[in-house]
Amino acid sequence: MRVGLVGVGRIGAAHAQVVRRHPQVTTLRIADAVPARARAVAQALDAEALEHSDDVFRDVDAVIIAADTSAHAELLITAARAGLPVFCEKPVAVDVAGTLRVLDEVSSAGVPNQIGFQRRFDAGYVAAREAVRSGALGEVRRAHVITADAAPPPPEYVPTSGGIFRDCHVHDFDMLRWVTGHEVVEVYATGANRGAEVFGANDDVDESAAVLTLDDDTLATLSGSRYNGAGYDVRMEIAGTAATYVVGLDEHAPLVSAEPAVKFPAGPAFREFWPRFEAAYEAEINHFIQVARGAAASACTVADALESFYVAEAATRSRRERRPVTIDEVRATSGDGTDHPDSSKGATWTS
């Protein structure tokens, strides 16, 4: 296979290493908005550097997009029109309208596509999903999801992030859908500003909370922070009538037990996302290679990403307007009045 990759920041450069190691990939062609960065990564990997991003869609069998968020939609559309299987980091676009446009393009073109919700490849989330599917959990009654950063992002990132629910918690919304097999129907979200002024100045918050109702009346709660000094904390608790599973509860969880005889977890705590999810990032790219070859179904299509983005939009609106917001309301006001074909052509994926 010949693979093109556009965008070699931290995640893109890591994806490039995984692609280069794959035994079925013979050629890797790399482009970046900063050509010198593409040349440096290509030289280290014995790959081909391209001077222009448009060149990445020529003479390849699949494309991986890890460019800046603002470029995702147009790059996805270019790949679709070129008839190329495409992987793209989340989000698909900066807003619902852009995501719908991409969905129409990839659906019309019929190209295999996968969006980078890497938690679908994390061993803990996979085990929790299997416990729900097998009945080991019993009937699911409630869930709690957490994403808390040890330190806030750079100030210059905040104005273009889309806000904490779109940028950060969209992963939690995706996991609620994927693990439980049910859709969120209503969100009541809130937030607070306790840290840098840049968050409030951009109509964002640095502390977040929400209550979500699923379509079977399962209740889920969410909490998050940009200032979790104890460490990077990503967990999911899912409780049923037979068992409770916890994702992310290991030696690296940034927790201290108040019980005097308990020494778990021993640490050290993760300080950022990469060591927590490195194996999942590698697994998702290896899976996409199989998707591009026609040997596997997509793990997360543009259509899947859209559903989680609707929840993020509902949470953002709820926080701003201080009221519960339904997903149907968001869908109706986004102009999405019809069912879109699933861009995976009806395929479903299970690990």
Image (cartoon, helix red, strand yellow):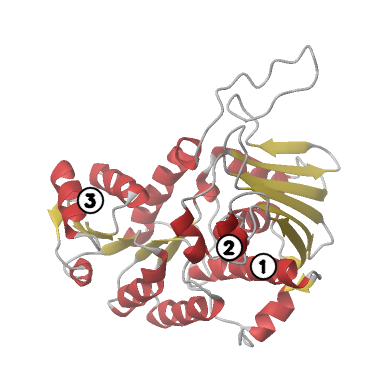
Q: Which quadrant of the view contains residue 253? A: top right
Disc 1 from disc 2: Cα separation: 8 Å
Disc 3 from disc 1: Cα separation: 41 Å
Question: Which sits earlier in the primary sequence, circle 3 or circle 1?
Answer: 3
Query: Residue 52: percent from the left, percent from the top?
Result: 18, 68
Q: Quadrant of the N terminus?
A: bottom left
Question: Which sits earlier in the primary sequence, circle 3 or circle 2?
Answer: 3
On screen, residue 91 above or below 99: above
How many badges with numbers are in the image? 3
Tell me the amino acid under the disc marked 3: Val
Disc 3 from disc 2: Cα separation: 37 Å
Question: Which sits earlier in the primary sequence, circle 1 or circle 2?
Answer: 2
What residue is pinned by disc 1?
316
What residue is pinned by disc 2?
163
Query: Residue 39: percent from the left, percent from the top?
Result: 15, 52
Tell me the amino acid under the disc marked 2: Gly
Q: Secondary structure at mark 1?
A: helix
Residue that appears at 57% across and 43% down: 149
Residue at the far top: name it.
261
Residue that appears at 31% across and 80% down: 81
What residue is pinned by disc 3?
25
Query: Residue 144: percent from the left, percent from the top?
Result: 75, 47
Q: Residues within 10 Å of mark 2 (few under 14, many from 20)?
A: many
**Is 258 or 193 nearer to us in this picture?**
193
Contact (Cβ within 8 Å) of mark 1 with mark 2:
yes
Q: Secondary structure at mark 2?
A: loop
Query: Residue 220: percent from the left, percent from the top?
Result: 78, 54
**Is 139 or 12 nearer to us in this picture?**
12
Q: Is residue 267 left or right of residue 219?
A: left
Q: Secondary structure at mark 3?
A: loop
Q: Residues within 10 Å of mark 1 (few under 14, many from 20)?
A: many
